[in-house]
Image: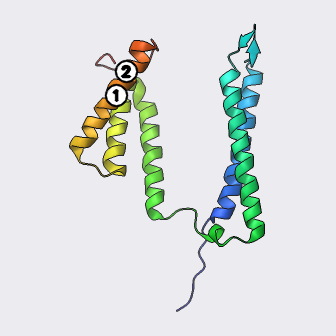
Amino acid sequence: MENKKTAVLKIKYADIIMGVLFVALAAWIFWVCRSDGLDFYHDNAPGPGFMPMISAAMIAVCGVGITVKAVMALRKNDPEGEKPIAVSKEWKTFFLIIGVCFASMFLAEILGLIITVTLAMIVLIRFLETEKWSTSIVVGVATGIVIYLIFVVFLKVHVPRGPLGF
């Protein structure tokens, strides 16, 4: 039987690509902060760019670390790096999460943020953790209640409200 060679992204290359993308993302965040005039420190207090720039610095450090580790593994000819980046089940999980996130972004303005987060949690718990519907609904509703209490009641954050008022 002939051994077909398939084009599969190997872990060693995926890690290098991901590390470089993280560094690029961090550079973009820094650029946006600077171009929008978000100061890191302003009037003896952290400015509006403080958290984004701290986050960008952490993303950059992680990106450099991932890249360096991947390049070192590539030089050692590590057999772990020859494995495919993901198998079929992992891709399905990835696309389910991405799909739920995009649907949540679009539905938040229509249904409200709290309801959208609740529905997203129910779907993720039901289909990723394969829990029963009853468990998924209880955990999803509890998550929605906790998010509502933290952000709306205690922090007074204005979130998109849906037809039910939250």
Within 10 Å of the Cα at label 1, are there few (<14), some (14-19), or many (20+) other Cα atoms? many
Quadrant of the image for the C terminus?
top left
Instruction: In the rendered structure, find residue 144 and report the number of the disc placed on it.
Output: 1
**Side of 109 where 16 appears, left or right:** right
Residue type at numbered disc 1: Gly
Residue indicated by mark 2: 148
Q: Is residue 22 visible?
A: yes
Q: Position of residue 65 (x, y in %)?
A: 72, 49
Whole-percent x, y for residue 148 in the image = 37, 21
Q: Is residue 15 above or below residue 103?
A: below
**Which residue reaches farthest bottom?**
1
Q: Position of residue 132 (x, y in %)?
A: 23, 48
Identity of the residue drawn at 37% across and 30% down? 116
The residue closer to the viewer here, 108 or 125, is 125
Vertical arrangement, residue 104 with respect to residue 156, above or below: below
Q: Amino acid at mark 2?
A: Tyr
Per the image, label 1 sits on a secondary structure element best described as helix
SS at circle 2: helix
> Which residue is rendered at x = 66% and y = 24% of the image?
51
The label on residue 83 is none
Whole-number angstrom distance, CA of label 1 to CA of label 2: 6 Å
- Residue 67 lies left or right of residue 102; in this view the side is right
Determine the residue positioned at 69% across, 70% down.
78
Which quadrant of the structure image shows residue 15?
A: bottom right
State whether residue 109 is above or below residue 16. Answer: above
Q: Residue at x 70, y 31 (%)?
A: 29
Q: Are marks 1 and 2 in contact (CB under 8 Å)?
A: yes
Q: Position of residue 70 (x, y in %)?
A: 72, 59
